[in-house]
Amino acid sequence: MIRINENFLKLRPSYLFSEISRRLAAFQDSHKGASIIRLGIGDVTRPLPRACIDAFHKAVDEMARQDTFRGYGPEQGYLFLREKIAEFDYRSRGADIDADEIFISDGAKSDTANIQEIFSQDVRVAIPDPVYPVYLDTNVMAGRAGDMTDGRYSNIAYLDATPDNGFVPTPPDGQVDLVYLCYPNNPTGAVITKERLAQWVDYARRNKALILYDAAYEAFIRDDDLPRTIYEIEGATEVAIEFRSFSKTAGFTGTRCAFTVVPKECTAYDSALRPHSLHGLWMRRQSTKMNGVSYPVQRAAEAVYTPEGRAQVKELIDGYMENASLIRSSMEDLGLPSTGGENSPYIWVETGMDSWDFFDMLLEKAHVVCTPGEGFGRCGRGFVRISAFNSRQNVELAIDRIRKVLS
């Protein structure tokens, strides 16, 4: 008799975005032909930069010729891409990251989900609330979370992110081993200063803890004083792994390319308190379970760092951030306090009512899709996340519809 992993039964009944899709499908079935504007799931809507498309085509043509064809690539990723990442994303910011510390993958979601495999099942995990669901759900699947009571798991240390702390929690008084942080934050759009990020690095160094730092939205930061990488903080290479993605930065959500940085001095310990390199463990995991990202995709990602690619990516991001600014100002004009939208493509809106009820109201009356904050955790109750990933025309139309419903 085959038995299942019963930790899966401890997951919440529905993944947030699956529930949104279910409600949307039911609405569409009963409202044939309704024009729906989606500002919910954070998927990009504009095409890949021209520089990436040209590099893609060139690489595909190479795969058609005997002298330039490539089979299996290096599991860690091609050096030509890793070197560009190290130069432009890290050394240009004063962060001493080597190309050999970078691992190319098919997505930050995959990496933030899979990284927990290299840690003991009994590590104490700290997760912000509200939070991107993947951090929590993968630890539930692994058996670390315990049982759920009143919407929270008993073995998880929750870090409340609320308006009172600017949605940036401070380190806990007690001991935790593994800390998930995400800035600019998904879902709240909040950002963290160097001073507050340094508090977390100091905490991790004092407690021999590890920070898993999701910086997938760093390209949307407009304030030059804010950190673009955790490795701008002294000592972070000892205690932090960073995740990045080309998905929102350059529109690779359907193309799939991201990377994770695991510094060689980043260390964890076995049961006898002997230190081990996390770089080596992640290398072993990836080379065992992954064959890498395709050559044409990595060439397309490399083109992001050309002068043409950087200009085109900036244009994409500028467009989304103009949407974000309009959404935030419009929500505040309607009397709804909002966070984000200034250094992030997400706007976190305080609704004054149940978040799922607000979602249903906008869907039914405005034909606009947002994301209920409650799906991100208990502290998300009463909030919704609105995404700036859409055309300017659709954003303006959505705001006009929302104004008519809420005014």
Image (spheres, grey):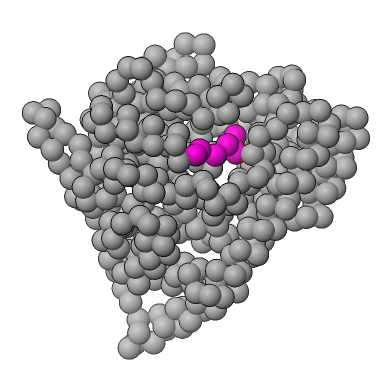
Counting from the top left corner in percent of width and height, residue 271 is at: 12, 28
Closer to us: 358 or 229: 229
Q: In the rendered image, which quarter contains the C terminus?
A: top right
Left or right position of 34 against 170 = right
What residue is shown at x 54% (from left), y 52% (from top)? 224
Which stretch did the figure color magenta?
Answer: 188-193
Counting from the top left corner in percent of width and height, residue 111 is at: 38, 46
Closer to us: 296 or 13: 296
Is 361 inside the magenta-drawn segment? no
Image height check: is 29 above or below 223? Answer: above
Closer to us: 35 or 244: 244
Left or right position of 228 against 123 = right
Counting from the top left corner in percent of width and height, residue 247 is at: 53, 55
Left or right position of 303 against 1 = right
Counting from the top left corner in percent of width and height, residue 304 is at: 50, 68
Main secondary structure type of the part rendered in magenta? loop
Q: Is residue 375 visible?
A: no
Q: Is residue 203 visible?
A: yes
What residue is shown at x 46% (from left), y 78% (from top)? 60
> Toward which corner of the image does residue 3 lie, by quadrant?
top left
What residue is shown at x 61% (from left), y 46% (from top)? 343
Q: In the rendered image, which quarter contains the N terminus?
A: top left
Image height check: is 270 above or below 312? Answer: above
Image height check: is 58 above or below 1? Answer: below
What residue is shown at x 39% (from left), y 32% (from top)? 199
> Toward which corner of the image does residue 8 lie, by quadrant?
top left
